[in-house]
Image (spheres, rainbow, N blue to C red):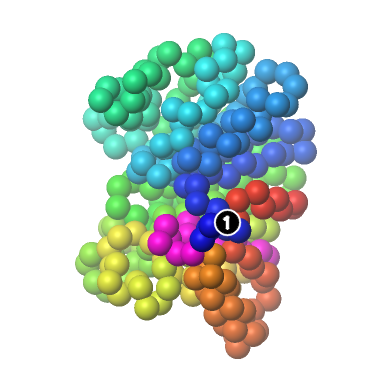
Amino acid sequence: PQTARYGGNTSCVDVRLDDVTMLIFDAGTGIRTLGGAMMAEPGPIEAYIFLTHMHWDHIQGLPFFTPAFLDTTRLHFFGPEEPPLTLEQVLCDQMRRPYYPIPMHAMAGRMDFTAMTEGSVSHAVPGAAIEVCELNHPGKTLGFRVEVDNKVFVYATDNEPFGSDPVTQHLVSPSRLVEFARGADLLIQDAQYTQQEYPQRLGWGHSTHIDALKLARDAGVKQLALYHHDPTHSDADIDRMVAQCQAWIKKHKARFTFFAAAEGDCVAL
């Protein structure tokens, strides 16, 4: 009940192009519900799945993704690798005993796996260019910039400001995220903590809602979605963060719009 409006599933975003090509960003618990909706659509399923990193809250829904069990389904996975493990091995490992009773090879869908890293650009999705930027988060973590028909979507969850304290420096040097997100029509950005919470969570790899606003302003984005809500935050907590954002926007005369992401939100670009 406390998260009835904003939702309690972990990260998963569905992007549909005009030709209904499906891109999925992260495979947290939200992908289970998405899979159910996809099963109700006509025809065989094909999807391009972009994983920011391998932390469980971003991949734990995959074993429950019903379309993957159909032999007519085709899934293309993209994400980071941390040798010696490949992207495929990491995803398979979370479905091995004792973690899960059904191995990944029991999924009948056809799958392929492509590693991406800082500066990679993929044209695997017809009509789209998808660029990668490494984010400041423990473990190799990617942000994605999608450009299609002069529209730009940037997905940059799980990112901490690169501060003076070494525990906040997960990269050798600051991420190029400001330039990476430049001019985006929609930026989905980590906004997990309040400013009061963050000092007790240095090095955990996440931003505050005010950090997200500053990034959106500096990058000149058109619209910002506050994302990756803290699991301890209730709807009322997020409402208070939204009110603080509104006050910040007014004070700084910012020109972009924003909203706190909620399950089921649909944004047309």
- Residue 27's place in the image compared with 196, above or below, is above
Q: Nearer the viewer, residue 165 or 34?
A: 34
The x, y position of residue 85, in whole percent, is: 28, 29
Mark yes or no: residue 141 visible: yes
The residue where tag 1 is placed is: 4
The x, y position of residue 150, in whole percent, is: 73, 50
Residue at horizontal 71 percent and vertical 53 percent from the top: 267
Q: Seen from this angle, which residue lies furthest bottom?
A: 251
- Residue 257's place in the image compared with 269, above or below, is below
The reply, left or right, for residue 42 in relation to residue 132 is right
Q: Is residue 32 magenta?
A: no
The x, y position of residue 233, in whole percent, is: 45, 64
Residue at horizontal 34 percent and vertical 35 percent from the top: 81
Mark yes or no: residue 213 visible: no
Q: Seen from this angle, which residue lies furthest front?
A: 1
Dot 1 crowding, Cα within 10 Å, few <14, some 14–19, many 20+: few
Magenta part of the protein: which range? Answer: 221-234
Q: Seen from this angle, which residue lies furthest right?
A: 18
